[in-house]
Amino acid sequence: MAENNPKIYDIVIFGASGFTGKYVVREALKFLNVPNSPLHSLALAGRSPSRLSQALKWAARSDSPPKIPLLTADTSDPNSLSRVAAQAKIILNCVGPFRLYGEPVVAACADSGCDYLDICGEPEFMERMEASYHEKAVEKGSLVISACGFDSIPAEIGLLFHSKQWVGSSVPNRVEAYLSLESDKKIVGNYGTYESAVLGVANADQLAQLRKSRPRRARPDIPGPASGKGGSVMEHQKQLDLWALKLPSADSVVVRRTLATLTENPNGLPGVNESDERAKKREAFWSSIKPAHFGVKIASKSLLGLLPTVVLGLFLALLCKSAFGRWLLLKYPSVFSLGWFRKEGPTEDEVASATFKMWFVGHGYSDSSLASQGNKKPDTEVITRVSGPEIGYLTTPIVLIQSALVLLNDRDNLPKGGVFTPGIVFGPTDLQERIQENGVSFDFISKKALSP
Ligand SMILES: NC(=O)c1ccc[n+]([C@@H]2O[C@H](COP(=O)([O-])OP(=O)(O)OC[C@H]3O[C@@H](n4cnc5c(N)ncnc54)[C@H](OP(=O)(O)O)[C@@H]3O)[C@@H](O)[C@H]2O)c1
């Protein structure tokens, strides 16, 4: 963070009036001025003070909520963003789609040395911000970390947890994450996520162009076959008894960027004011991590349960390319997603009823020397699991707020600044324990030898 710059607010939640934003406010209030919490001052920011005030009342479940400053800021007014960034230690950005609204917020934070976390799940935005703002963020001491929501903290921290189960000389080759969403009510997402997905697919060529224009990142040295086993688009996962379909989510892209940064910095990223003891702990942490090929699949107990994903995927592929097709998709989200996404979002009951399980099924070798023996098949399987409440509006606020509290608590032991993925920054911190204490579990399930 920039020095000699009085920061009035520990955290400012930008986009607090949005569907996700108001759940983030509800989660933040649990930690405001309570014993052992580093959160002493909170402000909400957005375009409309009256909508912010309504969101605060909703989040506090009270018509006379705590007195929290409401700051006016609009992404089309850079000065308003600079004013907020100048007063905040951390901005939590909940204004999306990020490809439309995110860049001025990152620019304001990088300029003023304010830390920035967001709940973006859009790979192009994240990679563009890294290309455009990394140098400035390093210089000014601003940590810019996207994907601090369900995309992609459970995948990032879940994969690190999984990796630590490959003890001794055993090594993973490929880890497949199977994401199962469960509820006794309907599973529903809000329009904001749907719009972000539609615009992401419509502009997929821009991501390809951006990647072509950038230098190739380092690739980790993964023992065993080049892309690992598990490339099928659809499968029946026998161990879990789940049907699964490849999911082009942000998670695998974010994980790949974390592994690239780790390959370039095998000891991780030094903290700005780190003690020797903490440096040793960080180095020990990363030396226990064994990179693997990684993919994500959406999973369901029945083939029918995958139908909304298949239907939405087909409509996105068919309609995203034309302006009329995009108009149709955005006008009728419920029709094209078989009710999965709604303009007005899920009800509180629907949110409260939903849960997720993310199973990490890893295949690898009982001894790393086996991996170098030509095409020898993996002989070991490890299964771990991350599970928790509804993904978009309960787990996302939990992991975002805990990430922010780690920044407040542990800033000296984190990098001075730069644009990074959550895994490389939070891996060696207590983030996993914190989110576990707040309802997201990390469990070891099994380890077994595979028949040849
Ligand atoms: N990582 C994850 O797992 C995860 C989970 C949930 C959501 N998300 C992402 O979060 C984003 C928001 O989703 P949502 O469903 O909460 O959307 P939403 O309900 O439409 O909320 C959007 C928010 O952005 C604000 N906003 C829009 N334009 C603005 C501008 N020009 N300047 C300032 N504020 C502006 C809106 O303010 P007003 O009240 O003034 O309109 C509102 O507060 C999406 O990109 C979604 O994909 C990610």
Image: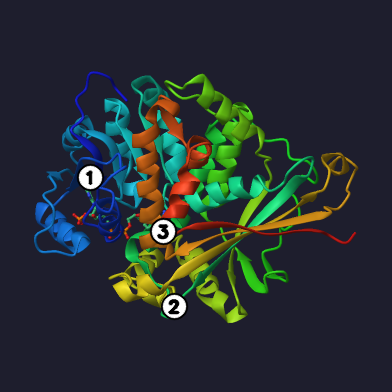
Label 3 neighbourhood size at 10 Å, few (<14), some (14-19), many (20+)? many
**Residue on which the image places disc 1:** 33
Q: Nearer the viewer, residue 216 or 445?
A: 445
Q: Amino acid at mark 2?
A: Leu
Query: Which of the marked residues, 2 or 3, is nearer the chain's N terminus?
Result: 2
Can residue 171 be seen from the camera position used here?
Answer: yes
Ligand 1 within 8 angstroms of badge 3 C-beta: yes
Q: Nearer the viewer, mark 2 or mark 3?
A: 3
- Tell me what residue is drawn at x 43 percent, y 71 percent: 354
- Distance of label 2 from label 3 (alpha carbons): 23 Å
- Distance of label 3 from label 1 (alpha carbons): 22 Å
Element at label 2: loop
Q: Amino acid at mark 1?
A: Asn
**Residue on which the image places disc 2:** 338
Query: Which of the marked residues, 1 or 2, is nearer the chain's N terminus?
Result: 1
Residue 299 is situated, as x and y percent measured from the top left of the image, at 59, 69
Q: Nearer the viewer, residue 413 or 73?
A: 413
**Residue on which the image places disc 3:** 395
Residue 206 is situated, as x and y percent measured from the top left of the image, at 47, 45
Element at label 3: helix
